[in-house]
Structures are given as structure tokens and as C-alpha cells.
Image (spheres, helix red, strand yellow):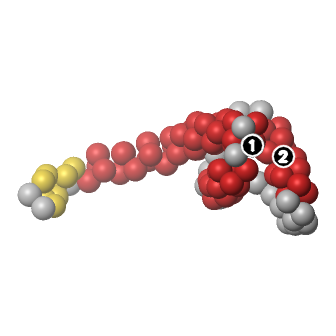
């Protein structure tokens, strides 16, 4: 079925196919993004950029609400970030029993 939208011809079958491909690739792309931001969080912590570390951690919290492909090392990376977050909170006198990534 061909539909005209704002002067463009759109094939509905192609649109459905594109949506399916997007849904299939979202977990993979989210894993790439997760890996990048985990790397950034580790850099920030290492450089004592604790505000930036916390900002990246909040971003990761939100990303983990989306589907993410499990590469096997993701749970370990998340545990490392949880531990670093706990250290950061202890250094700042913050005790948060719900601290998670």
C-alpha cells in the first residue's frame, strides 16, 4: 500500500519492515551506548570528576530501562559502577540503600 504523506510517497510495507529492523537493532545499539557511557563513567571517576560521574550514572540508569543486549560482561561492568558509586557516596557522606545503576 502506497500512502502520500506531506508530498512524500511512503510504502507501508517498507515502513513496517523498517520498524521491525529498528526494534531488532535497539538492544544492540543500546549495548554500544551502554559500553561507551560505562567507559565515560570510569574515566570521570578516575579523573575525580565526581559530578560528571554522577551525571553519567543517571544517564545509565535511564538507558537500562530500555532493552539492552547482554554481552556477558555487562553485569560485571554494572557491578563495578555500583561499587564506585557506593564509594563516591560514602566519600560525600551519602548513604543510599537504593543506590543502583
Identify the mark nearer the N-term, 2 or 1: 1
Looking at the image, which is closer to me, 20 or 36? Answer: 36
Above or below residue 75? Residue 87 is below
x, y percent for residue 30: 58, 44
Q: CA distance from mark 2 to mark 1?
A: 11 Å
Q: Please report the residue visible at 36 percent of the width from the left and 45 percent of the height from the top.
A: 18
Q: Quadrant of residue 76?
A: top right
Whether residue 79 is visible, yes or no, is yes
Whether residue 64 is visible, yes or no, is no
Left or right, 26 with respect to 60, comes to: left
Looking at the image, which is closer to me, 1 or 80? Answer: 80
Name the quarter where the C terminus is drawn.
bottom right
Tally the numbered discs.
2
Q: Please report the residue visible at 8 percent of the width from the left and 57 percent of the height from the top.
A: 7
Looking at the image, which is closer to me, 50 or 12? Answer: 50
Looking at the image, which is closer to me, 74 or 10? Answer: 74
Q: Please report the residue visible at 89 percent of the width from the left and 55 percent of the height from the top.
A: 91
Q: Secondary structure at mark 1?
A: loop
x, y percent for residue 44: 69, 41
Query: Which residue carries the number 1 mark?
Result: 48
Near mark 2 (Cα within 10 A), the count class, few <14, some 14-19 or many ≥20, is: some
Extreme-left residue of the structure: 7
Query: Which residue carries the number 2 mark?
Result: 84
Q: Nearer the viewer, mark 2 or mark 1?
A: 1
Amino acid at each position: 500500500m502506497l500512502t502520500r504523506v506531506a508530498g512524500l510517497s511512503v510504502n507501508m510495507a517498507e515502513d513496517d519492515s523498517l520498524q521491525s529492523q529498528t526494534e531488532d537493532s535497539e538492544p544492540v545499539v543500546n549495548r554500544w551506548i551502554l559500553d561507551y557511557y560505562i567507559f565515560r563513567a570510569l574515566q570521570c571517576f578516575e579523573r575525580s570528576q565526581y559530578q560528571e560521574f554522577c551525571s553519567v550514572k543517571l544517564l545509565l540508569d535511564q538507558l537500562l530501562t530500555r532493552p539492552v543486549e547482554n554481552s556477558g560482561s555487562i553485569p560485571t561492568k554494572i557491578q563495578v559502577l555500583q561499587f564506585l558509586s557506593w564509594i563516591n557516596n560514602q566519600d560525600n557522606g551519602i548513604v543510599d540503600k537504593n543506590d543502583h545503576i
